[in-house]
Image (cartoon, helix red, strand yellow):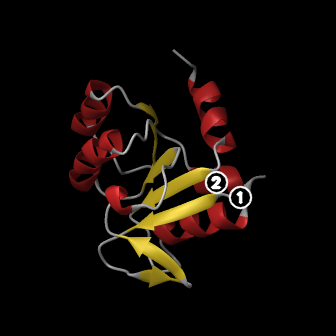
Amino acid sequence: MASEKDLKKEMMESKKWVVVGVSGKKEKYGYKIWKILREKGYTTYGISPNYDELEGEKIYKSLASLPEKVDVLDMVVPPKISIGVLEEAKEAGIEMIFFQPGTYNDEVVAKAEELNLRYLLDDCVYATLKAE
């Protein structure tokens, strides 16, 4: 199994991401992460039931509605939502999950294990990209 460092490197080198929990509120990480990924040249989709579009970009209601397969799912929702998204991710063929702080609990991690998903915990994609 790849180390966390190797997995993070693979994730950051993957150029198609989806942010589950994208937000139109600029102070929220759901917005900041979506925005910085796009600024750094990643193809980035947003998932939220609350928006149809943000800054001229279509926002999707589910992973199944994305126009193409993505490589990495960035989770920016509470654990009670995360757990359901994992099944959707598996069905959509997304294997790499980047859990932002506060988006998982033991039950969510157990579900990710059960589905054989590759995931990172206790890290922040925003901080990683901001430091580049």
At horizontal 66% and vertical 57% (from top left) the residue drawn is 42
Front in this rendered view, residue 83 or 130: 83
Whether 39 is drawn above or below 2: the answer is below
Residue at the disc numbered 1:
130
Residue sitting farthest toward the right: 132
Residue sitting farthest toward the top: 1
**Drawn side of residue 132 relative to residue 81, left or right:** right
Residue 55: where, in percent of width, then height? 56, 84
Whether 1 is drawn above or below 127: the answer is above
Whether 86 is drawn above or below 20: the answer is above
Residue 100: where, in percent of width, then height? 45, 50
Res. 127 mark = 2
Mark 2 crowdedness (10 Å alpha carbons): few <14, some 14-19, many ≥20: few
Amino acid carrying mark 2 in the image = Ala
Residue 35: where, in percent of width, then height? 60, 70
Residue 41: where, in percent of width, then height? 72, 60
Badge 2 vs badge 1, beta-carbon distance below 8 Å: yes
Quadrant of res 127: bottom right
Quadrant of res 65: bottom left
**Drawn side of residue 6 relative to residue 106, left or right:** right
Amino acid carrying mark 1 in the image = Lys
Residue sitting farthest toward the front: 67
At horizontal 37% and vertical 51% (from top left) the residue drawn is 102
At horizontal 44% and vertical 35% (from top left) the residue drawn is 95
